[in-house]
Image (cartoon, grey):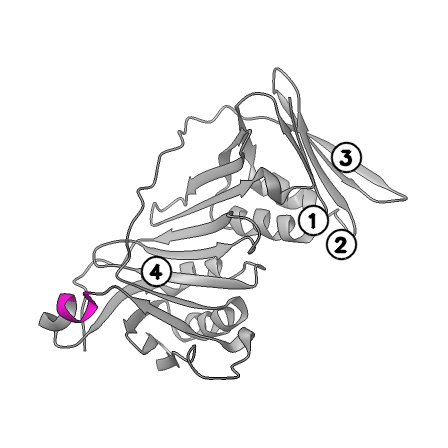
Amino acid sequence: MFRATTDNTMLFKNLVGVVSSLVGEANLYCTKEGLCMQGMDASNVSMVSFSIPSTWFDEYCCTQDTVLGVSFATLEKLFKCAEKTDTTVLETKTPHEKLFVAFQSRNRITDFEVSVLDLDAELFEIPDTDYACSVSLATQTFKDLVAHLHAAGDECSVCIAKTEVRFKASGALGNLNLALKDNSTKPGVDANKMIRINVCPSFDQDFAHLGGAELEQHFLSSKLFCFSKSSFPNMTLKMSPDTPLVVEYPLGDAVKGYLRFYLAPNIGVVQSK
């Protein structure tokens, strides 16, 4: 038996919607510790993964490890019936042929039965990586700048230095350059406007041969635009040479859950200035 309930219906709705924009179907892994999933997009360029610990839910019960093949496209349509004040209920019983989804309020209950799919996919372990650099900022800041990049063109680059991160895009409209400077050490900075850049201790030495202590990679802005649709308040970009970019949204300070996107760089050599 598996059953989970949450009053964070709108956040869960957003998570389902963001996942469905990249992955139509994927396995949902239910364990005593919580829920997790992984899925590649159709082009095999990007991957989405999330881990929601049991403590994030208001009620959580999983008597045995269960794999539920679900259509996130279908779940997204179901969540259109959910209201802000609803409690979301997910439930399945042996032999796990149906996933029951319900939205409950004081005066209304909307429930659905969704067929569980038999998907040929396995959960693989993503190795822990010590990234060369990272940038932490408010989700809204990331959302705004990615919207500008996407409007300018589908080719963009992210360049992280010790004190600033630069974004560039080019297309039919011309060239766009955006820069954000680290302001985390300045007094009185609004938390919603704080930008924190972290680099590994050997950053200067590792990238000196490129003509400057900075790391640049090139990506599809359309993918970054999809990643920016999360409603979680804060996010972090992580980069290392010859490694997929990570866009990570923590689920909150009190839990260790996350929503992560991985994006392979465009073919080419990591460049500096």
> Which residue position holds label 4?
238
Left or right: 261 with respect to 9? Answer: left
Q: Nearer the viewer, residue 118 or 62?
A: 62
- Label 1 crowding class (10 Å Cα cut-off): few <14, some 14-19, many 20+? many
Give the SS element for disc 2.
loop
Q: Which residues are magenta?
A: 202-206
Q: Main secondary structure of the magenta part?
A: helix
What amino acid does circle 3 point to?
Asp
Residue receiving disc 1 = 9
Give coordinates of residue 27: x percent, y percent: 49, 32
Q: CA distance from mark 3 to mark 1?
A: 14 Å
Upstream in sequence: badge 4 or badge 2: 2
**Image quadrant of residue 198?**
bottom left
Q: Is residue 162 left or right of residue 118?
A: left
Q: Residue at x 37, y 56 (%)?
A: 246
Q: Is residue 73 above or below residue 262?
A: above
Residue placed under numbered mark 3 in the picture? 111
Q: Amino acid at mark 4?
A: Lys
Q: Are marks 2 and 1 in contact (CB under 8 Å)?
A: yes
The residue lying toward the viewer, choosing from 87 and 121, is 87
Q: Is the Cβ of the residue at disc 1 closer than 8 Å to that at disc 4?
A: no
Q: Pointer 3 and pointer 2: residues touching (CB < 8 Å)?
A: no
**Mark drawn on residue 84:** 2
Counting from the top left corner in percent of width and height, residue 152 is at 40, 75
Is 40 situated above or below 219?
A: above
For label 2, count other residues whose C-alpha is less than 10 Å away and answer few (under 14), some (14-19) or many (20+): few
Residue at the (56%, 21%) spot, across then down: 64
The residue furthest right is 107
Q: Secondary structure at mark 3?
A: strand
